[in-house]
Amino acid sequence: MLAVPVVLVVGGVALFIACLFAWFHAGMFFSGDGTYRRGVDGSAFQVEFPAVDLSRPGRYTFRFTRLGPSIDYAVGFHVPVQSSAVVAMSMRNERGEVVFHEKRPLSEWTWRYDLAVINGIKDEIPIGGGSVRVQPRGVGPDGGWGTHFQPRWSGRYTLTVEVLTPDTTSRLLARPVIEGYTSGL
């Protein structure tokens, strides 16, 4: 009779250790055009792609898969200074679904230090007693919302960046990044 609880305890401990290993070695299975790193610029996980030139029109495509762990990720640009360039950023998954598609001047993106992202739209739903529940509006496949998403481990993604109207004041390079946070951005 004691054998069953011992097996369950040993199995539970083994599963816990496997989860810890997977968390701390999440980037080990990442594959794609970017560089996967942990603990960069305040993010728990980051993928940095090759730089794009905001001073010239152009289209850049990046592919990746096995982005883990499965938490909320923000996709944006590391830019040393704010820019007037008009940029389109879109992501598709292997099913051909548009995870997100955003287009606007970088000066209108949400800035957190040198990271520019687009947050989706939120609705405040009254729940009584003066309280509200915040609900994201227009969430797409794989949690796409603004330039945020929640990747699937087996998902294969294509990130496309287009410089539609360049910022011709000077040569300006921006690095597309995906940053994963264990708490809100």
Image (cartoon, rainbow, N blue to C red):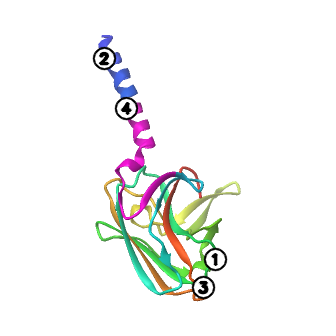
**Amino acid identity at mark 4:** Leu
Question: N-terminal of the two: label 1 or label 3?
Answer: 1
Depicted 183 relative to depicted 54: above or below: above
What whole-number distance in Å separates the C-alpha atoms at marks 1 and 3?
A: 12 Å
Assign a secondary structure to mark 4: helix
- Look at discs 1 and 3 and give the one toward the viewer: 3
Q: Residue at x 59, y 74 (%)?
A: 109
Q: Which residues are magenta?
A: 16-38
Report x, y in % for residue 178.
48, 62
What whole-number distance in Å separates the C-alpha atoms at marks 3 and 4?
A: 54 Å
Label 3 with label 2: CB-CB less than 8 Å: no
**Amino acid identity at mark 3:** Ser
Instruction: Give the left or right position of residue 57, taking residue 133 as reference.
Output: left
Report x, y in % for residue 66.
35, 54
Q: Nearer the viewer, residue 60 or 144?
A: 60
95 part of magenta stretch: no
**Amino acid identity at mark 2:** Val
Q: Give the residue number, with chain letter if any, for mark 4.
A: 15
Q: Rate crowding at label 1 as few (under 14), some (14 to 19) or many (20 or more) other CA atoms within 10 Å.
A: some
- Look at discs 3 and 4 and give the one toward the viewer: 3
Disc ID at residue 170: 3
Report x, y in % for residue 121.
56, 70
Q: Residue at x 57, y 51 (%)?
A: 183
Question: N-terminal of the two: label 4 or label 1?
Answer: 4
Disc ID at residue 4: 2
* Residue 147 visible to an observer of this rendering: no
Assign a secondary structure to mark 1: loop
Assign a secondary structure to mark 2: helix
Label 1 with label 3: CB-CB less than 8 Å: no
